[in-house]
Image (spheres, helix red, strand yellow):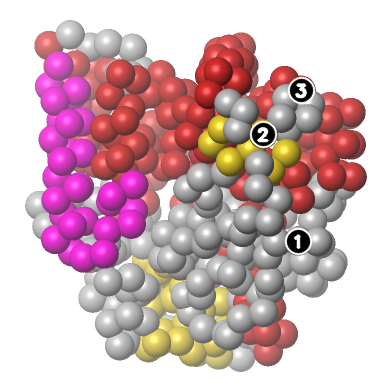
Amino acid sequence: MSRCSVHEAVSFPQTRTCPLRPPHGYAELTAQGPLHRVEFVDGRTGWVVTRHEEARALLSDPRLSSDRADPGFPKISPRALVVRGQPPSFIGMDPPEHGRHRRMAISEFTVRRINALRPRIEEIAEQAAGRLRAAGPPADVVAHYALPIPSLVICEVLGVPYSDHEFFEDTSRRIARAGSDEETAASVRELAQYLDSLVEAATKRPGPGLIGKMVREELARGEITRESLVSTAMLLLAAGHETTANMIGLGIATLLEHPDQLAEFRADPDVVPGAVEEMLRYASVADTTGLRVATEDIEIAGRLIRAGEGVAIPNGPANFDPAVFPDPDTFDIHRGSRRHNAFGYGVHQCLGQNLARLELRVALPLLFERFPTLRFATPAAGFEPRRPDVNQGLDTLTVTW
């Protein structure tokens, strides 16, 4: 029996009753239509999009802006989305400025570059498995396995000293889960100062990794300001470890909850890529990142989004749209569809998706190979959901073997 109840009231943003999958209330909205009126935290009214077709159409529509400084941008949290004095990262920019900044970072995330990292990712995963074994049983698989792997990988990609990982993991966590503007701003400044010190060091002696490359090339040519380089590094560092760590933890829990499919996952390497896509769909960890504001009137699905109105395009409802994913509440490693919106869609589709996929394809099979009797340490325990305005995941997951 699943340890997660699926019954809850319809609202937005919704709190999950189970962190393994989006709120069940999304299904009610999807059944009623693709667009719905919603009131955001600041009292402004806007729209939430709950079907796959309309979500992709709007995520590709240039009349929707990602500018978080726009007064109409949806506010779904009491914490600040824009910190005064800190320039936006490229996810908060619109074309053509967005494309120009994104291209500065893309060289480290191409398929060819990511595939070349596979031996190193395998080595990192083996080391994490060794530390997990030394810590238990029982042991927290999030702290000793799911978090260290993507943290070390993104440090090497960016050229950030892994010796500082506890600092940036803690600071990134505080930024994501701060309860007020003041808490957000203080943590953002702290992380920005740290990354600025790395940029400063790289201007004197550029090292390996993306930060050193951008200092040698884009910063030296005046293509990017130092402040914008810090914002880009902050985005990639925070997103590169937390979201993938969330997916590894949720992937482990989901497979343990489906022992028959876990047996197939263990036995057949050919199943792994499709299983990873299903985990990405099912977990939808970055559920509330698709926020936009209309710059012009937009007619879609018989509704009119007016200029200045906020639009929330959560990936959870799109990933559970029965028109695209039959029987969406069923976890099925043979579904094998890449039509999910777990990495977003359109020009803002996640830059690091190739890296995240590879880390999942390496970390999950290796864990279950090294720990063939891995299981929940406390079968009666439940999973605690996070608040709805942050990336979803498990803070801890105690396992034994």
Q: Check disc 3 and report the residue beneath it.
A: 369
Percent across and percent down for residue 285 are 55, 54
Looking at the rendered image, the quarter that the N terminus falls into is bottom right
Magenta span includes 223: no
Depth-wise, is mark 2 or mark 3 nearer the camera?
2
Look at the numbered discs 2 and 3 and tell me whether their residues touch, using CB distance below 8 Å.
no
Q: What residue type is labelled 2?
A: Thr
Magenta span includes 182: yes
As displayed, is residue 291 above or below residue 370? below
Percent across and percent down for residue 194 are 17, 31
As displayed, is residue 294 above or below residue 200? below
Task: Determine whether, in the image, residue 338 is placed left or right of residue 64.
Answer: right
**Disc marking residue 400:** 2
Depth-wise, is mark 1 or mark 3 nearer the camera?
1
The kind of secondary structure the magenta stretch mainly shows is: helix
Earlier in the chain: of badge 1 and badge 2, it is 1
Task: Determine whether, in the image, residue 39 is placed left or right of residue 253.
Answer: left
Magenta region, residue range: 173-201
- Mark 2 residue element: strand
